[in-house]
Image (spheres, rainbow, N blue to C red):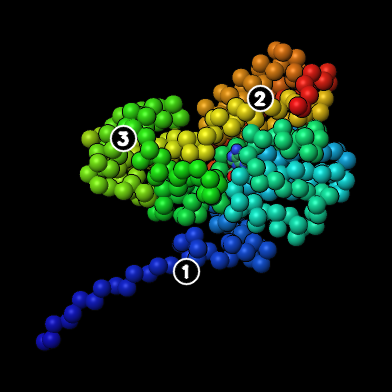
Amino acid sequence: MEEQKHKRRIHYSGKYPKKFEEKYKEHNPQKYADTIAHVIEKGSTPAGMHISIMVQEILDFLQIKPGQQGLDATLGYGGHTRRMLEQLNGNGCIYGLDVDPIESEKTTKRLRDLGFDENRFQFRLTNFANIDEVASEAGKFDFILADLGVSSMQIDNPQRGFSYKIDGPLDLRMNPNKGSSAAQRLREITKEEFVGMLIENSDEPYAQEIADKVFFRMQKGAAMDTTTELREAIEAALVYLSKDERAEAVKKSCQRTFQALRIDVNSEFEVLYAFLDKLPSVLKPGGRVAILTFHSGEDRLVKRAFKEGYQNGIYSEICRDVIRPSAQECRMNPRAKSTKMRWAVRSTADLCTID
Ligand SMILES: C[S@@+](CC[C@H](N)C(=O)[O-])C[C@H]1O[C@@H](n2cnc3c(N)ncnc32)[C@H](O)[C@@H]1O
């Protein structure tokens, strides 16, 4: 009898596109609304989109009224801006800022297509550290929102290098046309500086082990210019951990290492500090500001600035405690889990002026 040859089963790749670029329906939310609704219902963020966090809590606090002028310091997908523009009811204007030239162009177009013209919405490609310059052109603001960190569009796009889960260039810049990429930074700094960066920016417990491995591999000729190369170096650094704890430890260390590099290449603490310092001078008396943060380093800066401002009489009211998204929101949008919101109200005594 002729021996039957074993045929390998053809790998079934599934009918759902797996790669970011292949998710063409998700990249066209206007055309494929059903697909978008289905992806969101499953607790995922559609490719090329960002689900805005704590929208109702922000609107409840900002108390936006027609005729007011507002600022969205971190435009992103424009989800918050859109909801704030709706509160203006066709009367008033919002300035949107972002440092990302790629996504902000698409967002501005989306908002224009929704009918928000130059009288309602103005975009400025600038860092929120420059709010004083924006205010000297536009005048002071009745309300300001800053939703810090990165957008889902940035995280999910492999070309931006924000995620250790997808292979791509180790970039991590919000504006890829400015400054050094994370890969360049690793070549510019010493091992000791890298250890300091991991500890200061992310409280990384395995900072020394990770830095030893990354620099050892670079000295041996590894380029360390892709997200995968860095992830593999982190995995190798933690290989001595027991099997039980390793997977979770690697995941957390990857998250913290990428966060530390992102904070560094975008000077996130420095620009937040400048923003918080200038805030009182760009808010009208009685003006309201809400800030969403995503890690303890950011929250500490915001908490301290609001507390000091309250003690100095610059703010008449600040939130007593941090406000967190509801359990339901976190279920619907797992990216909301680490969010902390703080707010402040500018005192009616006008103590600051814009130079
Ligand atoms: C979390 S997203 C904002 C999402 C937005 N609230 C929405 O509803 O779509 C943060 C955005 O802030 C931008 N960003 C981060 N740091 C910035 C800075 N210093 N100045 C201006 N924009 C910044 C990022 O490029 C990103 O687009």
Q: Residue at 20% of width from left, 76% of height from top? A: 6
Q: Secondary structure at mark 2?
A: helix
Q: Is residue 232 left or right of residue 94?
A: left
Q: Residue at 68% of width from left, 63% of height from top? A: 30
Q: Quadrant of the C terminus?
A: top right
The foreground one among 251 and 349 is 349
Q: Which mark is residue 185?
A: none
Above or below residue 211? Residue 96 is below
Tell me where residue 131 appears, x and y as whole percent.
Answer: 70, 34
Q: Give the residue number, with chain letter if any, for mark 2.
A: 277
The kind of residue tagged 1 is Lys
Sequence-first disc among 2 and 1: 1
Q: Quadrant of the N terminus?
A: bottom left
From the viewer's perspective, is the residue at label 1 or at label 3 nearer? 3
Above or below residue 312? Residue 95 is below
The foreground one among 168 and 236 is 168
Tell me where residue 218 appears, x and y as whole percent.
Answer: 28, 43
Q: Which mark is residue 15?
A: 1
The kind of residue tagged 2 is Asp
Q: Residue at 37% of width from left, 34% of height from top? A: 189
In the image as oriented, which residue stretches furthest toward the bottom?
A: 1
Label 1 neighbour load within 10 Å: few <14, some 14-19, many 20+: few
* Mark 1 close to ligand 1, CB under 8 Å: no
Q: Which mark is residue 210?
A: 3
Sequence-first disc among 3 and 2: 3
Q: Secondary structure at mark 1?
A: loop
Tell me where residue 331 appears, x and y as whole percent.
Answer: 56, 43
Q: Quadrant of residue 58?
A: top right
Above or below residue 305? Residue 145 is below
Asked whether the viewer can see residue 139, the reply is yes
Q: Quadrant of residue 330?
A: top right
